[in-house]
Amino acid sequence: MIAAEPAVRASAALRDELAAARRRGLTVGLVPTMGALHAGHERLIERSAAENGLTVVSIFVNPTQFGDPGDLDAYPRCEERDIAVATAAGAGLCFVPDVSDIYPSGHSTRVCVRGPLTETLEGRQRGPSHFDGVCTVLSILFALTGPDVAYFGAKDAQQLQVVRRMVGDLSLPLRIESVETVRDAEGLALSSRNERLAPADRQASLSLSRALAKAGRAILAGDAGDAREVSKLGMQALHEGGSEPEYFAAVDPESFEQETVPGPKTLLLCAARVGDVRLIDNMTASFAAETGYGFDRDREEI
């Protein structure tokens, strides 16, 4: 791993650091983040550091992907800690730009992916501007860093497929790698938003992984014959677990279209509000069935 300044804010300084790395023949891995780093981010950074000469971690809360100004304002920010966590995990460089550096005065370009992949689930709930904002900021970060490979967590499964589509459609010269979701001992997917969960909402937050496990078991047992039955079962499990469900879906893992006949490879996704925090999660049906989240050793629901 190349030794560099721990953090840069200006794109010109970033380019200078990257030019030095490439003169040494080093490959560049990028881990794009919005900060509030946790163990899931650490795994992304460690993976990149193991596979590349220089790992760049971007820390930027992207305003263009937030439809709700209140959600943007409430997003956790802890810059000094994030830089320390990223560096300890193997980052050679942290890019911490200001909004004006990413979106200078007069910025008027948006990168959009259209079709079912962006118009369902998260796209429907958060509006079309959400994925437009994601694609736009990533296009800018890819242009600034020119990475050989970029790493994303599998928790944001729909976003991951949107990024893959964008990179493929635009023939961008980089590889997209996904890293398995990191969970706590009870199954809650790690997320920066978890920091905002009130202690009293902890149990309700487990409803997401437990609903996924219940649906996966039903699919493999043949008790849920189509996507509508899976959705109904999952929504009920979310509600009974104490969260406010937004959606529960069984889709093809690449196209994100509803599965006519769900099977082991079907991707199960859900979103729900717990208190004032919005959480998402996903698992394949086979993985969900095997986890045991929400079931005791005798496989009875708890």
Image (spheres, helix red, strand yellow):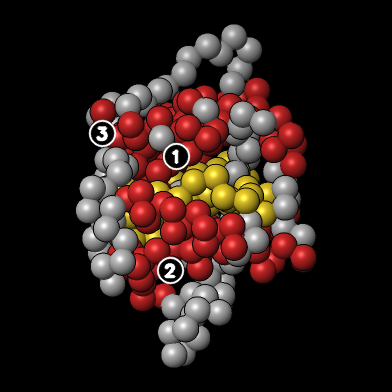
Residue at image position (36%, 76%) is 290
Amino acid type for the residue under numbered disc 2:
Ala
Q: Are marks 2 and 3 in contact (CB under 8 Å)?
A: no
Reading the chain from its start, which is encountered first: label 2 or label 3?
Answer: 3
Q: Which mark is residue 168?
A: 3
- Where the N terminus falls, by quadrant? bottom left
Give the CA separation, mark 2 to mark 3.
Answer: 32 Å
Q: Position of residue 284 (x, y in %)?
A: 34, 61
Residue furthest out toward the bottom: 298
Callout in the foreground (2, 3): 2
- Where the C terminus falls, by quadrant? bottom right
Give the CA separation, mark 2 to mark 1.
Answer: 19 Å
Reading the chain from its start, which is encountered first: label 1 or label 3?
Answer: 1
Residue 58, quarter of picture: top right
191, above or below 186, in the image: above
Residue at image position (50%, 54%) is 235
Where does label 2 land, which residue?
Answer: 213
249, above or below 65, in the image: below
Residue at image position (32%, 27%) is 115
Amino acid type for the residue under numbered disc 1:
Leu
